Image: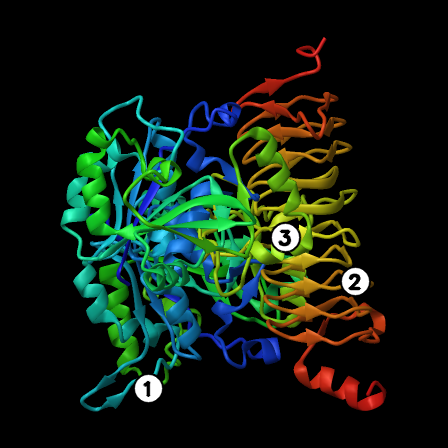
Amino acid sequence: MNNKVVAMLLAGGQGSRLKSLTYTIAKPALPFGGKYRIIDFPLSNCTNSGIDTVGVLTQYQPHVLHSYIGLGTPWDLDRHNGGVTMLPPYAEIDGIKWYAGTASAIYQNITFLQTCEPEYVLILSGDHIYKMDYELLIDYHKEHEADVTISVLEVPWEEASRFGVIHVDNKMEVKEFDEKPEKPKSNLASMGVYVFNWKKLKAYLESDNISEESSHDFGKDILPAMLENGEKMVAYPFKGYWKDVGTVESLWEANMDLLDLNSGLNLHDPDWRIYSSNPQLPPQVINETGTVEGSMVNEGCVISGEVLKSIIFQNVTIEEDTSISESVIMGGVIVKKGAKLHRVIVPPGLEVPERFEIRNQQDKVILLTQEKLDEWKERDHK
Amino acid sequence: MNLLAVVDASVKKEGLQDLTMRRTASSVPFAGRYRLIDFTLSNLVNSDVSTVGIFPSYPLASLLDHIGVGKSWDLDRRKNGLYFLPVTQRDGGLSSVGAFAALEEHIQFFTKSNQPHVVVTNSFVVTQLDFRDMLKQHIDSGADITEAVSKGVSLKNYILSKELLIELIQTHQDKKVVSVEDVVNLKKSPHTFNEYEYEGYFAVIDSVQSYFEASLDLLDEENRGKLFLPDRPIYTKVKDEPPTRYINGSKVRRALIANGSTVMGEVIDSTISRGVYIKKDARIEKCIIMQKSIVEENCDLKYVIADKEVYIGKGVVLHGTAEQPIVLRKGETVTKEDLR
């Protein structure tokens, strides 16, 4: 028996609640943490867990992702055997088949999976920030002789209804699976990370595909069907930092978590590096007039103003007499003299004009846009 | 591009000894995230030179590890690209650039290539030389050998025809000359010489003193602007370091800092390499701290060069001077007890 694991990384999501940040890129391509894109986390987890065959399923705005991942070199996934394969929807004789749901995305790549000849298939989501050793999950799956293992996390009760909620017995066997229930019976949430025995999964995908009522989704269709048929489904309790950055607020929170040494999300861990593409930029410079405290700053930045509790991406210029606090400033942004930003996310490439200030009601997180800058200029700052 | 490059990475500089115990001058760290040779290789690729022979001296490991197959410089090519050409003589390496004995061992590098001109360059003079421009001026001048100079200082970069270089290599023993630099300096030869005046940034790194000065000069915006040109990037081996974090209470003023570092203390007028730790209440002024060094709490350092992986224990006070910075060698540990 072979032990081969193939990871299928679902990276086609739009992330519509992230507004203008995901108009032109898929959610997994979203910049995070001063240097990374969200997809760096699951890809690096694969590399660090010894998984060397990864299919990346794209659909919504795939161009940035395709060019970013390329041959997979930054994650050591440019291999002769296996490596990374980009899997966008494709056309067949009878037309283009878009991915209708998470399960149909995998179903439509059965041919790819067949050529890999896996024993296990690991389903991952490209829009979560976490560090996880998938090898431990797979070992657990084997030990429990399960047909499918779902990685779960304890979440606060009040948030449980946002997730697929899982009910287990004392052997961690799953008894019930409720996708986003109104009244959750448990606070064990599915992380969208599953290990399947490939043969079993293949059979369920095939029957799901011909079912007319199905929405072709793992959480809504495949897992309930398996449970109904009495397949062995176990839950793997994951402990550690995990975040689904679905909204502007949660994206901001996850960035701020990097600045908290006790948040559990440590990027400065040489034993579990998060790999990313590395542009060739000079070191960062803090000038005579600059101050930086409680922040993270990437290469190519020139800081001449005040930066407090903020994440500063590559190639950002912060001019004199500026004040930046609790903000996320993405790549290539220029913050002109006298500008003040508090709790603001500035998307890549914007130029924040001189003396710009945004009135921030009740400390809400504000996503800056070109339109907002234009409005500000129009209003009273010609 | 009809130019072939010889990077002489074997040149020995006595004054740099403290920094070159386990590496050649070419792999001395510079400007936070680079090695000296990066500037030479980047100039070559930014000038469209795609056939590059590196002539190293021993110990090789540090340089070989850094260069690899040349991927960072886009020199891992099917055709041409990077050639690593070490010599058999372990004590090789002269103090002048373009040693004929080394070039002779790899004469095939020249005879098998089809570029008509050769640039002989080094890795201890940091410049932003454009070799296309230099070659054009060399051809227009009609001279046999062109030397790059700036403000009366030789940059030890030479262009000559491949034919002449091969002839010099084959006859150097009879002519009692040891290197291309030697030939140029003698001037008592049948050859004609030309100077190429270069106006950009340059720094000759041939002593700890000049290394220290050149490093701190980069804190000056004007100098930095001349060395880091957006359309001529400096390439180096990439590392997967996270952005540098500045912890609450950090104070930083006039500093050049690479990724992957953690700053808790005070950093003034200094350059910090990748993966460095400056702990709480430590104070660093006019210092160069290299990769993965740790400066513990309450240290007070002034005019100190700490090489890679140096450990400076709690409360250590070290003050050098601008003329004589204190050098801590690679891997060294300094504690308060050591200084008693």
Q: At numbered mark 2, what does the secondary structure look like: helix, strand or loop?
A: loop
Instruction: Select label 3 or label 1 by which is in front.
Output: 3
* Residue type at the position of mark 2: Glu
Q: Residues within 10 Å of mark 2 (few under 14, many from 20)?
A: some
Residue pictured at 27% horizontal, 44% vertical: B190
Residue A283 vs residue A338: left or right?
left
Q: Measure the C-alpha gap from mark 2 to mark 1.
A: 62 Å
Q: At numbered mark 3, what does the secondary structure look like: helix, strand or loop?
A: helix
Foreground of the two, B166 or B294: B166
The residue labelled by disc 2 is A320
Position of the C terminus of chain A, as image quadrant, is: bottom right
Height in image: A273 above or below A188? above
**Percent position of residue B230, x then y:** 53, 64
**Percent position of residue B314, x then y:** 71, 22
- Do the residues at discs 3 and 2 belong to one chain? no
Foreground of the two, B200 or A257: B200
The residue labelled by disc 1 is A212
Circle 2/circle 1 CB separation < 8 Å: no
Q: Which numbered dot is residue B223?
A: 3
